[in-house]
Image (cartoon, helix red, strand yellow):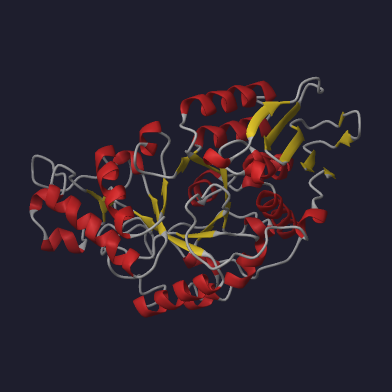
Amino acid sequence: MKRFFTLGVLLAIVATACSPKQGFERPADWGNTVVYEMNVRQYTPEGTFAATAEHLPRLKELGVDVVWLMPIYPIGVLERKGTLGSYYAISDYCATNPEFGSLEEFDAFLAKAHEEELFVVLDWVANHTSPDAKWINESPADWYVRDENGKTIVQYDWTDIAKLNYDNHDMRAEMEKSMRFWLDRGVDGFRCDMACEVPFDFWQTTIPALRKDYKNIYMLAEGEHTELHVNSFDASYSWELHHLLNAIARGEKDCEHLIEYVEKDMATYPKQALRLMFTSNHDENSWAGTEFERMGDAAKVMAMLTFTLPNGQPLIYTGQEMGWNKRFEFFEKDNIPAWEQNEYETLYKELTALRHANPALAAGVNGGNFELVEDVPQGVFAFTRSVEGNSVTVYANLTSKPLSLEENMLAPWGWSIVTINE
């Protein structure tokens, strides 16, 4: 059976999305899941677990599988940035930020997410704490990296943090214990902030130990290094791809650079590695600009590529599903005033449905083979991904001019997708 979709119009596939799950448990393979990053502070006017929980049915309908919560822990006061501080300056790993609600209210959020058959992962900041964290006062001094005067040190311009010392094995053990605190409550894994700043051997020891007791947890590394996939993480960031897509949208790079990237990435990373792909996230939105600022009219086609490129696991950031074109304040309250249903919700529903309905688009060992399509106009990036019984062919116009294919015309930054099921 052959289906043809033009310019991102994939509505026909929505009705044939994946069948209901038989029971709800963590998958052994996360390669066909879609991740959604939830910024709790800015998600609703209330900015609480209870208020965001009301949106979980909407995310399920959107086609999301994994909800990643930005850090939900108490924020330090010493050297705090702005009024509310950075989520990533944590004062206590085993408590919730009172701004968001109590531990019991988090448990209620988690229970509702699981009722909706959504997995929940927490943002885990293992590299540092706030300079007035609970551990500062309750642990030995050598749990932290200190200067010659005994003061905790900061990195980069992160003046609101204190770096942890991974030469101390007691600290490592307490870090693992803190992660277990949340896994015991039922969370489904972690997105690990600045994973490459933490010694790889910590992850290679800790993650297998956690997996012995918590079946099939999902582990995402904010980092781009092959060693992150050695006996540890399921997924890692594809930062290089993200910057390349921005450059193509600006006209600084082209299809040939994307082909080079895909071939290099496939050759560099192990087949089981999931590569998180995105057009936005909390860092990019707040500091580099929205996808519309960075990509302009190319934002939609670049989003489509994050759902279809080999080894890719797509990410949707808070507000992208309504085309929210505003940089969130990072240290202040700056919520979305109202959620709207519009063309972007339709786009992401179509993309998640396409993803779930076609096994060839999965990342990892079960994903489809990748093959370039030859004899297409210059500026068209065309490829097929296929597994037994299913293939998906993508034609993407990565220019600001209309380009002609044999069967149809591709609008500027437009695309066509052909699926075949046998």
Which one is nearer the viewer's eye here, 149 or 382? 382
The answer to whether residue 48 of the structure is visible from this angle is: no
Q: Is residue 33 left or right of residue 132?
A: right
Image quadrant in which the N terminus is located? top right
Residue 235 position (above or below residue 129) = above
Q: Is residue 228 left or right of residue 384?
A: left
Q: Count how many numbered circles sit on residues in the image.
A: 0
Which one is nearer the viewer's eye here, 409 or 331? 409
Q: Residue 51, image x and y in percent?
A: 52, 76
Q: Residue 34, image x and y in percent?
A: 58, 53
Q: Residue 263, image x and y in percent?
A: 58, 24
Q: Looking at the rendering, which quadrant does residue 153 occupy?
A: top left
Q: Looking at the rendering, which quadrant does residue 116 occupy?
A: bottom right
Query: What residue appears at the point 30 percent right and 40 percent down from the top-left corner?
Result: 197
Q: Looking at the rendering, which quadrant does residue 378 occupy?
A: top right
The answer to whether residue 346 of the structure is visible from this angle is: yes
Q: Residue 201, image x and y in percent?
A: 25, 39
Query: What residue appears at the point 21 percent right and 60 percent down from the top-left corner?
Result: 132
Residue 94 position (above or below residue 202) = below
Q: Is residue 411 left or right of residue 132?
A: right
Residue 398 position (above or below residue 113) = above
Image quadrant in which the C terminus is located? top right
Query: What residue appears at the point 60 percent right and 48 percent down from the top-left corner?
Result: 290
